[in-house]
Image (cartoon, grey):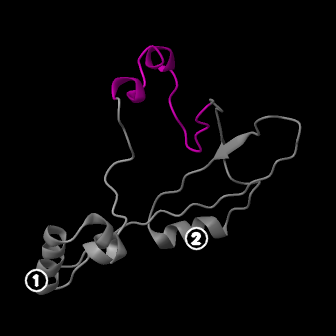
Amino acid sequence: MYLTFNRGVSINIFIKTKPKEKLSAVFHFELFGKREEKYATLNNLNVSSINWNRLQNKEPYNFFVPKDFSQSSKYVIGFALSELFLDFGSGVKNERDDICKQFTKIEMVEVIQDFKDKAEIDIKKI
């Protein structure tokens, strides 16, 4: 089986010309297609010939991609997840890769046994 994955590339040019302004103008351009087609297109473009789209600066998020804000008045009527849940976080984290990645069944069984037998502080030292 042969799998291919499309990888996105971001090319950014940041220029702030008016230091007293709080927000600078943000422009966006997307190019989709096969690698060779994108290379050919980019080789024939320059910064001034690209058909840029000016993005709306909407605080506090200031997205760097186009967004539809037409329903924002309805959206802000709602409530934040932090108001709904007393405890919240960024999800499952794997902060101890050396413990969690095992390449054989024997290594995996040893780690499971360590979790059963050892104190948390001792496992963190591994």
Residue drawn where x is 58% and y is 40% of the image: 63
Left or right for 108, reference 78:
left
- Measured along the vertical axis of the image, is residue 4 above or below residue 46? below
Decide if residue 91 is on the left or right side of residue 49.
Answer: left
Instruction: Please state the horizontal and vertical placement of residue 51, each as a whole percent of the image.
Output: 66, 47
Name the residue tied to disc 2. Answer: 40
Residue 120 place in picture, x, y as percent = 28, 64
Query: Which range of residues does the magenta coloring cover?
Result: 60-85
The foreground one among 114 and 35 is 114
Observer able to see residue 52: no
Residue plotted at (73% across, 61% down): 46
> For the residues marked 2 and 1, what is the alpha-carbon distance in whole angstroms?
49 Å
12 relative to 99 in the view: left or right: right
Disc 1 on helix, strand or loop?
helix
Q: Nearer the viewer, residue 109 or 36?
A: 109
The residue singled out by tag 1 in the image is 105
Residue 3 magenta: no
Q: Quarter of the image for the N terminus: give it.
A: bottom left
Please, what is the dominant secondary structure of the magenta stretch?
Answer: loop
Amino acid tagged 2: Ala
Considering only vertical position in the picture, is 125 above or below 22?
A: below
Q: Is residue 13 above or below residue 119?
A: above
Which amino acid, mark 1? Lys
Residue 74 lies in magenta, yes or no?
A: yes
Residue at image x 62%, y 66%?
Answer: 42
Q: Quadrant of residue 6?
A: bottom left
Label whose residue precedes the other's in the sequence (2 or 1): 2
Who is closer to the viewer here, 72 or 22?
22
Crowding at mark 2 (Cα within 10 Å: few <14, some 14-19, many 20+):
few
